[in-house]
Amino acid sequence: MGRVIKISESDIVKISKLIYESEIDLRQYDDEDFIEIFILNFRRWLIDNYGNETKNYPLSYVVNRYLSDYCKSIKDFNDDCLSSSRYYYSPKNEMIKVGQFLAKSGLEKIGKVPLSFKHTERYKKMWETAIKKAKIPSFVSYKLIEETPFNVVFEMEYDFDDFLRSNESFDRRRGIEGIPNNIREFLEKFGGVKFGRLQHGDVNFTNRIIVNNGDMWTDKKFMTKLKKQFKQKPSVADNVHSLKFHFDRYDNKPAIKIAFKYGNWNTRRTTVSSEIRDVLRANGFNIDNIKIED
C-alpha cells in the first residue's frame, strides 16, 4: 500500500499562494490596479477591526489614521508604512507598494480579462500569412509558441556562419532581429490584432533568438586568420594601422572598423575597403551582411 501524506488546510493555502505567485507578472499591471486591490483589502480589514461604520469614512482619513496598523497586520510584509520622514513618501506610493505585495503573495487576487482560446490557433491562417510576408531566410528555423492563451513567443534559431554566407533577400536594415517586428506590424495593419497586456485582453507578443556560433565574429582565431589575409593586400599593409571586429547594433550587422595610418585616409580609403571586401568574398561571405567602417 502506498504511503499516505496528509496535508493540512494551512498547507493547501500556502501551496496555492506559491502557485499564484509563480504565475503573476506585476509588470503587466498599472499603479491603479494595485491601488484598487489595496482599497478592497484595506476596507475589509477596517470593517473586521473597527466595524461597519468605517465604510462611510473618507479614504484619506482612514489611510492617515490606520494605515500603519494595517501594514503591521500583513504577514511577511515587513514594512510599517511609517515613511513620512522620507522625502519621496506619499500615501499613494504606500498603497501601490502594499497592493503589489498583496497581489504577488496571493493575499488578494488582481483582476484580468478572461481569455478562453489560443490566438494562434483560432487565427492560424492570419499568423501563417504574416510569417510568410516577413520573408524569413531559409537558414533561420522558427517556432510559434503559445503555451497559454494570447501569450505568444516567436522563437528563431540560426547559425551565424550561415548568416554571413547567405545571399538570400531579407530586410537587412532591421536584420534577423527585425523579423518579429515585421510580423507584428503586418498583424496590426491587416489583421487588426491589438498587442499589449494579457490582463487587458491583448496579445503579449515576444521573441526569442538563438544564435549558434554567435561569438565567431570576435573569436581570436577567426579574426587572426582574416587579418593575415587582409595584410597580404598591398594597400591594407601600407595604409592600415589596425582592424577592429565588432557588432554594429544600429545596422544590426557584424562590422570591421578600419583605423588608417596618419594622413592615408583620404587617398587610400576606397582601395583599402575594396581589398577587404575582396578577401571577405574569397572566404565565401556575403559582403552585404557585413559593414565596413572606413
Image (cartoon, rainbow, N blue to C red):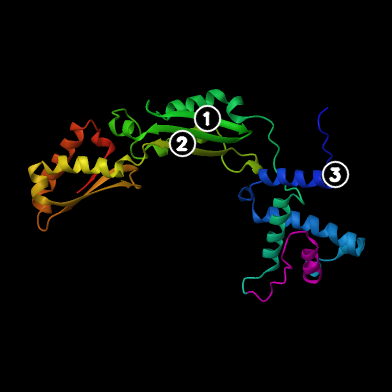
Question: Height in image: 80 above or below 129?
Answer: below
Residue bearing the label numbered 3: 8
Identify the amino acid type marked 3: Ser
Residue sitting at x 31%, y 27%? 168
Residue 173, position as x, y percentages in the image? 34, 40
| Residue 12: quadrant of the picture | top right
Task: Report if residue 62 lies within the magenta region.
Answer: no
Q: How many marks?
A: 3
CA distance separating discs 1 and 2: 11 Å
Identify the amino acid type marked 2: Pro
Q: Taking the image as drawn, is residue 291 in sight?
A: no
Q: Which mark is residue 180?
A: 2
Depth order, front residue of 53/271: 271
Residue bearing the label numbered 1: 144
Q: Which mark is residue 243?
A: none
Q: Is residue 165 left or right of residue 154?
A: left
Element type where label 1 sits in the image: strand
Q: Nearer the viewer, mark 2 or mark 3?
A: 3
Write down the region rendered in magenta: 64-86
Q: Is residue 109 left or right of residue 184?
A: right
First-in-chain label (1 vs 2):
1
Residue 217, position as x, y percentages in the image? 30, 41
Q: Is residue 178 left or right of residue 81?
A: left
